[in-house]
Image (cartoon, helix red, strand yellow):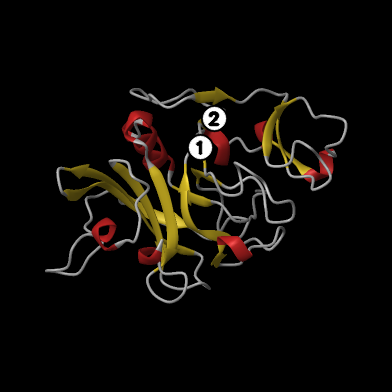
Amino acid sequence: MRIALVLGSVLLTVVGATGASPGEPPLPARMADTGGGSQLITAEAASTSATSGRLTWWDRRGDSWVAAGSAPARFGSGGLVEGEARQQGTSTTPTGLYDLPFAFGIAPPPAGTTYAYRPVTDASWWCEDNASRAYNRWVEGLPADCRPGEAEHLADYTVQYARALVVGYNYDRPVHGRGAGIFLHVNGKGATAGCVSVPAEAMSAILSWADPRREPHIAMGTTSGSTAITRY
C-alpha cells in the first residue's frame, strides 16, 4: 500500500503485555479465532477513526497465551474498516484475521529469521493495478499490463520496507478494487496508507520470533464494536 507521509512520532516500548485488564484472560483467549497456530500478532486500535494503537506478539504455551513482546503501532491515515467492505485508495487498514505469506526487505533478515525472506531488488514491484493479472502480487520487473503509476517500486521505501511481513489480506484470491499491498512494516513519518507499522526494533524482533512452522497469523481490529478484534 502506497505510504502516506502524515507527520507524527511515537516512542518505542517493546515490553511484555497482557492485552487484558487485571483478572481478565489475555487478548487471544478472548478472540473467536486465532488462526489455529501457536503464534499470533494482534494489532488493536481504540476505534475505527484511530491511526495508532498497540501491536503485541504472542506465544501459545499449552492452554495459555503469553505475550512475547509489544510495541506502539500505526494504522492507515483513514483509520480502520471491515476488511470485506474495504475499498482501494481509502488509506484504511482492513480489520480481520489474516495469515502472513512471507517476509521481505531491503535490509538483510535479522539474526534468527526462519520465515521465507525475499530480498528487495531494483526490479521489485508490488502491482496494485486493478486491470492487471498481477494485481496484489510481488513482481520482479513490471508486466506489460501493470502500469508503474499503479504499482509500488519497493526499493524506493528504504525506511518502511527495510524489513516487512506480507499480510494475507485479499491475497489468495484477490478481489480487484478491494486493495493491495497490505504489510506489517517499519514506521515511516506517520500514519500509513493502510498497512500496520511499528518501530524498526520491533519489526526486527518480530521477524526473529516468527516461526512459519507455528502458523502465525495477524489479527487487526478495534477494542469494541463491529470491528472488535475479539470477533475475528
Q: Secondary structure at mark 2?
A: strand
Indicate the position of residue 166 as horizontal and vertical percent values: 53, 39
Above or below 163: residue 222: below
Q: Is residue 112 left or right of residue 162?
A: left
Q: Are marks 2 and 1 in contact (CB under 8 Å)?
A: yes
For disc 2, the neighbor class at 10 Å (few under 14, some 14 to 19, many from 20) is many
- At 45% from the left and 58% from the top, the residue drawn is 220
Quarter of the image for residue 208 reads top left
Front-most of residues 185 and 169: 169
x and y, in percent, of residue 122 in the image: 71, 24
| Residue that badge 1 annotates | 164
- Camera sees residue 127: yes
Mark closer to the chain start, 2 or 1 = 2
Instruction: Give the answer, above or below, for where 47 lies relative to 150.
Output: below
List the single residue furthest toward the left. Answer: 23
Q: Quadrant of the C terminus?
A: bottom left
136 horizontally vs 74: left or right: right
Secondary structure under tag 1 reads strand
Disc 2 and disc 1: Cα gap in Å?
6 Å
Amino acid, disc 2: Gly
Dot 1 amino acid type: Ala
Asked which quadrant contains residue 153, the reply is: top right
**Near-viewer residue (144 or 36):** 36
Q: Residue at x 57, y 60 (%)?
A: 83
The residue identified by callout 2 is 105
Q: Residue at x 86, y 36 (%)?
A: 145
Tell me if residue 159 can be seen.
no
Give the crowd class for mark 1: few <14, some 14-19, many >=20 residues within 10 Å: many
Q: Residue at x 43, y 77 (%)?
A: 225
